[in-house]
Image (cartoon, coloured by chain):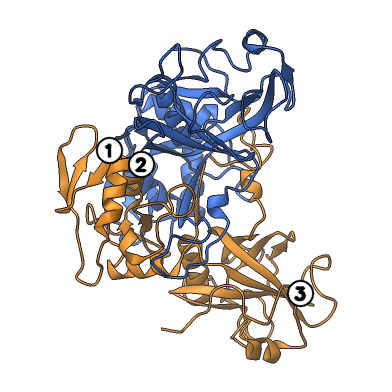
Chain colours: A orange, B blue
Amino acid sequence: MPERTYGEITGFPIGSTFNNRRELHEAGVHRPTQAGISGGKDGADSIVVSGGYEDDEDFGHVIIYTGQGGQDPDTREQIADQVLTHGNAGLARSSIEGHPVRVVRGAGGDAEHSPASGLRYDGLYRVADFWHATGRSGFRVWRFRLVADGETDPALDNDQSDGSDEPAARAQVTIQRIVRNTAVAQHVKELHRHACQICGIRIVTPAGPYAEAAHIRGLGKPHHGPDTRGNVLCLCPNHHVMFDTGAIYIESDWTVRDSLTNDVVGKLRRSPSHAIDVRQLDYHREHIAL
Amino acid sequence: MPERTYGEITGFPIGSTFNNRRELHEAGVHRPTQAGISGGKDGADSIVVSGGYEDDEDFGHVIIYTGQGGQDPDTREQIADQVLTHGNAGLARSSIEGHPVRVVRGAGGDAEHSPASGLRYDGLYRVADFWHATGRSGFRVWRFRLVADGETDPALDNDQSDGSDEPAARAQVTIQRIVRNTAVAQHVKELHRHACQICGIRIVTPAGPYAEAAHIRGLGKPHHGPDTRGNVLCLCPNHHVMFDTGAIYIESDWTVRDSLTNDVVGKLRRSPSHAIDVRQLDYHREHIAL
């Protein structure tokens, strides 16, 4: 498993420039010297946007990025379908895990947003969405919508609905999951192999297994829970919603109960390498459960 | 069921002022003439923040608001526990449904953020979180964290983890669901009584039933799906994740299949009053499913 560094690389702030891919590699900002995506099935940590794909679209804070593969090595024409493996699988995985992706722009890219020469590190983006389409060439390409960190996703811009059958005038979503992975959260999910500690379900997607790290006692204001493994559960989205809204709670003997009926829902699935902090369960029962 | 208007009231932009609760009522900005919360179990559409509760905290873009009930009508002292009914249930419901809440500040509130006299409409907020605590009086109070629309929730400010046992230095979350309800989404969820159209599960929380409106073909760029009932499914969060990541797809005879194995997962549950647009299912199979 490659060791990936997600996020900023110390010493290389936004705007750092590089003369060539070798310098970029040595800085650790983008490790591969050829590929546009640094990634594998564990996730992707960086990409280079340099106009290598005819289907790329660069809007600045939003980039529609084409996956890798299927190009003739000499002509760089698309000659085959792309598949969801290697870097493509990495970007999909980063999407569902919420990993930040370093974006580097090269001189060959969109004129408005790219450097005149060499390469420039342009900050962290999140993979908001991924899908496949038939590219201009007629072959399947994977596409990834990246949104600059700290910028509002334009898909959240507007929640007006006109009820007509026309495409929505502006982008809209009704629900968006913003995933911000921490080392602690990642570790707990891996310990449980992404299986829900309440029902045991393990959701498997084309981007790999999906689970959510649920803080027992919320972090930050107003709950001030600790960001420790003992304060995190690995849950499926359904049980995460139920736990966060206080629909279920967990007793000190690990019995899971329905808050509204007091019925037993089950027993918390535990792992010997994941010690849960029972004080946090007390807090959840006292403040969140009904 | 009261007819509530969520969102802005035409003719009363942010900053509109009112001399008293009667004017506020007549404007339709906050209907009740006494209660601080306009809401019931279908949701809450507005609140007045005016210092009536000793446990309120007003930080401007973030408000920690205390629920209603349990006060002596004469002394306004807290003399009993608050319960999750009436306006309190309304704010909890608005939290899980993503309804915007109009916030009005009165002269009695926090000195920094409140008007010197009368009442002022201060815009739309979302109920980010709700919980209960023992108030200064020793009785249970319900508390609601409201965040101004368009402002970043401070709980999303930082995703650094130091792994220590200390309370996180800054607020952090690992996942946040941002719900933006539309009339179309609400209607489809109500038609199916919040039961998942794939597995039939109906999640019930202390804030009422919870389901998610899933657009079959995404709205806005790049998918340009229509915001119509025919393009929306009522799903549980687990099946929503699976549908959006392409882990499952739906055939034209409503068979639901696993994208990775092609196994039959089940049959889509339909309602005679909810005509699903099969062209959108075609799009999902062609672009999202593996």
In the image, residue B188 sits, relative to residue B279, either above or below, namely above
Instruction: Tell me which corner region of the image, top left, top right, bottom left or bottom right, holds residue A196.
Output: bottom left
Q: Say which amino acid is labelled 2.
A: Cys
Rendering coords of residue A186 (x, y %): 39, 68
- Residue receiving disc 3: A15
Q: Say which amino acid is labelled 1.
A: Ile
Instruction: Estimate the spatial distance between the alpha carbons at disc 1 and disc 3, rounded to whole Å.
Output: 49 Å
Task: Indicate the chain on which mark 2 is placed.
Answer: B
- A57 left or right of B170? right
- Residue receiving disc 1: B201
Where disc 2 sits, the SS reads loop
* Residue farthest toward the front in the current orientation of the protein: B75
Q: Are marks 2 and 1 on the same chain?
A: yes
- Residue receiving disc 2: B236
Position of the N terminus of chain A by quadrant? bottom left
Where disc 1 sits, the SS reads loop
Q: Say which amino acid is labelled 3.
A: Gly
Instruction: Estimate the spatial distance between the alpha carbons at disc 2 and disc 1, rounded to whole Å.
Output: 7 Å
